[in-house]
Amino acid sequence: MKNQLFSTFLFFAFLAFISFSCEKDTTGDPANEQELITTVSITFTPASGAARSFKWTDKDGAGGLAPVIESITLAANTSYTISTSFLDESKSPVVNITAEIQDESNDHLVCYVPSGSAPAVQITDTDKKKNPLGLAGTAKTTAAGNGSLKISLKHQPDKKSTTPCSTGETDVEVTFPVTIN
Amino acid sequence: MNVSHIQCIKYRCFLGIMLLFSNYLVGQELHSPCSFKVKIAVVDPQGKPLTFVNVGVIGQSLGGSTNEEGILNFYNLCKDTYAFQFSRIGWEADEVTFLIEKDTSILMVLKESGIMLDKITVLGYGDKLGKTTIKEVLDLETLRSNMGFGLAESLKQLPGVQTLNTGASISKPIIQGLHSNRVLILQNGVRQEGQQWGSEHAPEIDPFLSTKIQVIKGAGSIRYGGDALGGIILVEPPALKKEEGIDGELHLQGMSNGQMGIASGQLNGNYSLGKLPIAGRIQGTLKNGGNMHTPDYYMNNTGVREKNFSWMLGTEKNKLNSLIFYSRYFSILGILKDAHIGNLTDLLNAIDRGRPLSEGSFSREIGRPQQQILHEFFHWKNIIEIPGEGHLEINLSRQFNRRKEFDAHRNFGALPASLENPNILFEITTFRGEIDLEHNWNSDFHGHLGLAVMHQVNTTDRGSLIPDYTQRTGGIYYTLKYKKPTSLWEFEGGIRYDMNRLRLDDLNPKLQDFKQNQFQGFSGTLSSVFHLSNSGFLVFQTGSSWRTPHVSELFSEGVHHGSASYEKGNPYLNPERALNNSVHFELKHDKFNIQWTAYYNLINNYIFLSPQKEAVLTIRGAFPAFNYSQTNVSIAGLDGNMTYSLNNHWDFTFQAAMVKGRNITGNDFLIYMPTNKVQVFTTYYLNAKENTTHSFIRTQLTHVAKQGRVPADFDYALPPDGYFRLDIEFLTHLKTNVLPDIEVGLALNNATNSRYREYLNRFRYFIQEPGRNLVIRLRIPFGHS
């Protein structure tokens, strides 16, 4: 009888063993880090005169330190060509993500929404399917005043939609204050 | 024999309780109104007379014990219905109701509570919940017809339970307006420990392994923990096979919506190893579903896979019962692609659109975002009989839960095509030990003394939503129950002390000041039952419970992409403390079956996400900020069920539930409280319903009102309109020559294909609820069962 109890116990112990050995805690691998966009830089180049760049930067990501936002200052009644770039300044050296956006241009769209005196932006570049991309453009300022310019980067937007900027997933959405002198 | 006796037999048999009786017409001569004689004989299943069985009449001061021949006589009874209660230590108590209108003899068969493998019924007698606990039991037929939809959706059939959903695939139960960490789920009597804090983390339990699911409402049972502010869900596998041999059953289900297929089977065996009887079961479930659709479009990436497996092995020797239970749950859940948004602008665009961008299409492929969840559960239960006292129960268990979440969301760059590296990975390992000792002060006072300890380690990899931690808890409780067969009253009270030590194992410098945390407190319940008449009773229950703030509430910080919000924990949170008060009424009388529960719960330091004035500015745009805060709240509600059986063929059931949650401090409503709900069931039985192989057609009409009780300026969209939904079900049994009867079910859910949204679905911003669904299911039992 004792033998039987003992063998039963062994059997249970064996079952317990195989159950426990099924799953173990995996040790912590380093995070599979993806690229982070920390900075949006927009450059305004007038027909004559020096180009000026303005940056929207949040190097430590969401939360933590507040972002640093430069104010866009432009001259009144002037035409500019615009180029926008996206950077990861949390890494050293700084990673320029704009090239990747160019590579996957069909899946991206940069949208510009002005308000107040800020100028409207005409997109001049296209993706591989000849749809607008938005890394380059033109703008013409009018009278002096204040306003703001919202720049957003959309991933997988529906570019055939009548309002392509309200489709897709937003990767970036920043707002610059704008002063026209 | 009169008719009421026959009904009684069938009812009893249906419940699986052994009861035989015979009725001799002693004499037909005229009696004065109060002169009937009732002779009660109590025997064991072998027919041997049972002495010293206490027999009482509920609601009357009549009673006594059986003599050496197992007989007790009652004299001078009036023409009335009498509910006789039978109890004896070591034997299962039972109750039976008779209409006495002539001299009657009753033969009652009592079952020994210690019969081999009877004890290995999952809960054991120790937790056999009495009337003092306010509870609802999902009946087996309803459970079987809903288990294909998951645990929470099955529970939704009870009037006191609603669900919090994330799309069509993730559903978790809400009891008395509360969910997640405020509701305990027990599998085979042991607390399930996963990542239950998240509102999109569904319970990791296969409903197919269970034949009984009960819900304890409010703070009714402190045995399972002092932190069940909302309630407790008990998921119990059936008892192991008692006779030698092998049997089993196979469930096959198909659903048109999502083209879901489910196969689940189990095999039960009992075999004697010499003189040692061994009983066992193996059980498994496979589930495969693709994209579901609403009346207007497909919901992309809403497929589901499940692979579950469990086994149980039990034996008994002398006074020891031992049972081992193992279960492994694995599921892959697709999450609606359109619900994945980058920022608040995207969310507002989606709400504005009111539907996904594309029509979608059917696919079984599950891409990103998705969840992969593994839950492993190992449990060793021992029950030792202590003669004259009751039982000692010892539970040891180990659980492991791994949750992988794969985002479609990325900072930048292409998404990894493979599903090897999750964006976030939680692993939690829990060891629990529990001891419960039953003892009797005398035949009227029964006590339980218990001890529970837990050790838990949680790690979070890739993504620091919550820190790594180690948690140790200890609890001790004592409950005392007073029950006397002749008394109109029953009482039960309990007190419990719990301690919780939480240590953070995280290197994050921000958390170093909060490495050691300790919480402790008492909880208690007091419950009394008053028997109104032979067939009705009232329960008054009051209890106080408390809950330690969860690590996610204390320390989480980051953007919650599902809701486009920035959520921030608060390390200075205090424990929540609830005062629960309930009144429950139950009446089973002839054609009526009524149950109502009213409750008023006050929770101090209720933890919730409070909206902040300042949004958090990120490069993705501004996110509304929410901080975990505390306030005092009240939750009041009423839920109930009324069934009227017109005859053998027609049943009508009315169910209703109402909850009102108030933020007392902020003088506002609470968000995400269940909406008023009314359901009407009409059942027509083709043959008599007492027939165990009956067939029926049932229609279920559900009305959910529009939620009007919402806090001001808290939500991105207004609550959706109320809706009606019609479900139709047909069930029958097919006779076979070789096998037992096969159960066949056909159901048409959302039969009118109505378009509606549910307030308690977090994806209501993006999509409608699923459209029409045709369900076909078979249950094929085999073996000699």
Image: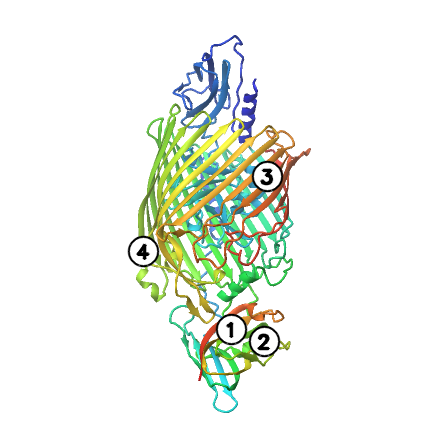
Write the residue at 49% across / 72% down.
Answer: A172
Gap between marks 3 and 2, in whole Å?
59 Å
Say above or below: A170 vs B472: below
Kind of residue at disc 3: Gly
The secondary structure type at the circle numbered 4 is: strand
Instruction: For label 3, count other residues whose C-alpha is less than 10 Å away and answer few (under 14), some (14-19) or many (20+).
Output: some
Q: Choose top left, top right, bottom left or bottom right for residue B530.
A: top left
Nearer-N-terminus badge (3/4): 3
Label 2, residues with CA under 10 Å away: few <14, some 14-19, many ≥20: many
Mark 2 touching mark 4, by CB under 8 A?
Answer: no
B578 vs B421: above or below: above
Quadrant of the image occupied by residue B322? top left
| x and y, in percent, of residue B24 in the image | 53, 14
Residue B266 in sight here: no
Q: Position of residue B612 (x, y in %)?
A: 39, 62
**Of the two numbered discs 3 and 4 in the rendering, the one whose residue sits closer to the viewer:** 4
**SS label for mark 3:** strand
Label 3 to label 4: alpha-carbon separation: 49 Å
| Nearer to us: label 3 or label 2 | 2
Q: Which residue is mark 4?
A: B517
Residue A152 is tagged as 1
Residue at the disc numbered 3: B248
In the image, what residue type sits under mark 2?
Ser
Between residue B64 and residue B199, name the one nearer to us: B199
Q: Are marks 3 and 4 on the same chain?
A: yes
How many marks on residues?
4
